[in-house]
Image (cartoon, coloured by chain):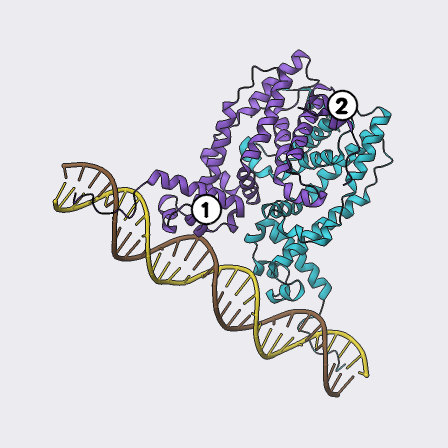
Chain colours: A purple, B cyan, C brown, D yellow
DNA sequence: ACAGTATTTATCCAGCGGGTTAATTTCTTG
DNA sequence: CAAGAAATTAACCCGCTGGATAAATACTGT
């Protein structure tokens, strides 16, 4: 009784604390960049004390690197979960594009973190041994899919898998990462349900048309009728 | 004589000062983002005093917006200088891609500024009347080129010009903007002369193959031999 | 030459922000 | 249950940064 009757002010939970700090830091760094992020806000968001950040992770830059490494680990893990090797080549490429698109949609902080790190010219990434060992499984996957596609006659030409990987990422990444400025420039909401569906159709159509030589429109997921009207609303 | 013999401590040059401030600010904001930029560094780089920034442009945020507006004005001006309407459709698209690629290569600060502004969810762009009136001439240009291409039989399908514009920008923008992290991930220098040439060939090939249905490789600028070897260096 | 204005300089300051110190509380273990 | 280790808290420090003030200097019209 005497032992436990006292009300505890707090409980220990080092692992949980560390996770909450990293999650809060991810949000903060993604929302404000490295210089714009505020250590106090991270602490508050994590339901922690500012001192805890330094106790668990070190200083601000270490915290940032830990967040970045976590982000790469997460996407690589999900990428590994996808096995597309057994699909026929065009279908595999389509799935790959859809996965990339949906991952970026589900994890907008990932885009912001990458942009932030590129603003730093990958200064932190370079000193990370962890990230360098995380090869994307997609490059090898694309290589075998493309090879199979060429052999089966589905594809016209054997593209460099790295180039294709970058291009697929680019089509999705740029659209989402720059949706704010693009929406202002074009005066339309690029993140509406319809706009997103149109973008996905466009990306799949573009890449598969390039690979197969067959017409664009047939790859649209649904409502391909939209694509038959080439004179859309004024811009 | 008596008039001019005195050594001047400084000369007035309001326009020149303003230009130097904006140029220095562009470099600083591009290199460090909005929060990371230092007003003192901008002043030093401009060969000016910190007080001058406030005298000429107002506060830090106004300075940032002025830089952003200048960046958009500059690219729009160069875009207008290109008239592609008279070229045959595939050639016009190729030129468009080359221009975009080269502009980004020549103006890396532009990429960084856009990323910075997107991190702010276009907060500043939204309050700029100037930028909103700066429509890119490329969208209308693409629309007519695509229409002509479809009519002449060069192109398979009439794409939405906005989607195509975004895709072309994406292929170049992402590669260059993210070259730092991508170079670490892939363990190769994506900015070497050869890598840049390969990227340009790939982009032109991808887009034109998609539009025309013809094979990828034929659009390469030179050394198309590279593309015939589909099993490149290990990644 | 003189007065008034535009431009530039030197200096200051209040608050913010990352980081630190030291004390307090909880857990572990013998 | 005692005592040391681990985790957490509260309070403080101080350099830096954006911004402000006022004085000095250059230009302009009369």
The residue depicted at 69 percent of the width and 29 percent of the height is A202
B79 to A84, vertically: above or below: below
- Name the residue furthest top: A152
User: Dot 1: few (<14), some (14–19), or many (≥20) neighbours within 10 Å?
Assistant: few
> Which quadrant would the C terminus of chain B be assigned to in this image?
top right
The residue depicted at 72 percent of the width and 21 percent of the height is A218
* Residue B223 horizontal/vertical position (percent): 72, 26
Tag on residue A115?
Answer: none
Label 2, secondary structure: give it. helix
Q: CA distance from mark 1 to mark 2?
A: 47 Å
Label 1, secondary structure: give it. helix
Say which chain tag 2 marks.
Answer: B
Comparing A180 with B88, the one in front is A180
* Residue C29 horizontal/vertical position (percent): 18, 36
Query: Does the image show residue A204?
Result: yes
The residue depicted at 54 percent of the width and 42 percent of the height is A117
User: Image check: A39 left or right of B228?
Assistant: left
A68 to B21, vertically: above or below: above
Query: Does the image show residue B232?
Result: no
**In the picture, residue B165 is in which quadrant?**
top right
What residue sits right under mark 1 in the picture? A61
* Residue D8 horizontal/vertical position (percent): 32, 47
What residue sits right under mark 2 in the picture? B218
């Amino acid at each position: 009784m005497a032992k436990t009757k006292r009300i505890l002010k707090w409980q220990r939970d080092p692992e949980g604390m560390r996770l909450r700090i990293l999650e809060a830091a991810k949000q903060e760094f993604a929302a404000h960049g490295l210089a714009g992020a505020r250590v106090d806000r991270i602490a508050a968001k994590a339901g922690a004390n500012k001192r805890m950040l330094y106790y668990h992770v070190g200083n601000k830059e270490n915290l940032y690197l830990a967040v970045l490494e976590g982000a790469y680990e997460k996407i690589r893990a999900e990428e590994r979960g996808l096995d597309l090797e057994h699909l026929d080549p065009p279908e595999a490429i389509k799935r790959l594009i859809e996965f990339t698109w949906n991952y970026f949609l589900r994890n907008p902080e990932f885009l912001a973190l990458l942009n932030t790190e590129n603003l730093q010219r990958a200064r932190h990434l370079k000193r990370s041994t962890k990230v360098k060992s995380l090869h994307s499984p997609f490059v090898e996957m694309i290589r075998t899919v493309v090879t199979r596609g060429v052999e089966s006659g589905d594809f016209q030409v054997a593209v460099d898998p790295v180039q294709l990987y970058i291009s697929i990422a680019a089509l999705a990444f740029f659209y989402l990462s720059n949706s704010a400025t693009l929406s202002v420039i074009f005066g339309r909401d690029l993140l509406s349900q319809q706009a997103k569906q149109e973008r996905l159709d466009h990306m799949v159509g573009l890449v598969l048309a390039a690979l197969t030589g067959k017409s664009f429109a047939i790859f649209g997921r649904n409502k391909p009728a939209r694509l038959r009207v080439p004179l859309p609303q004024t811009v």
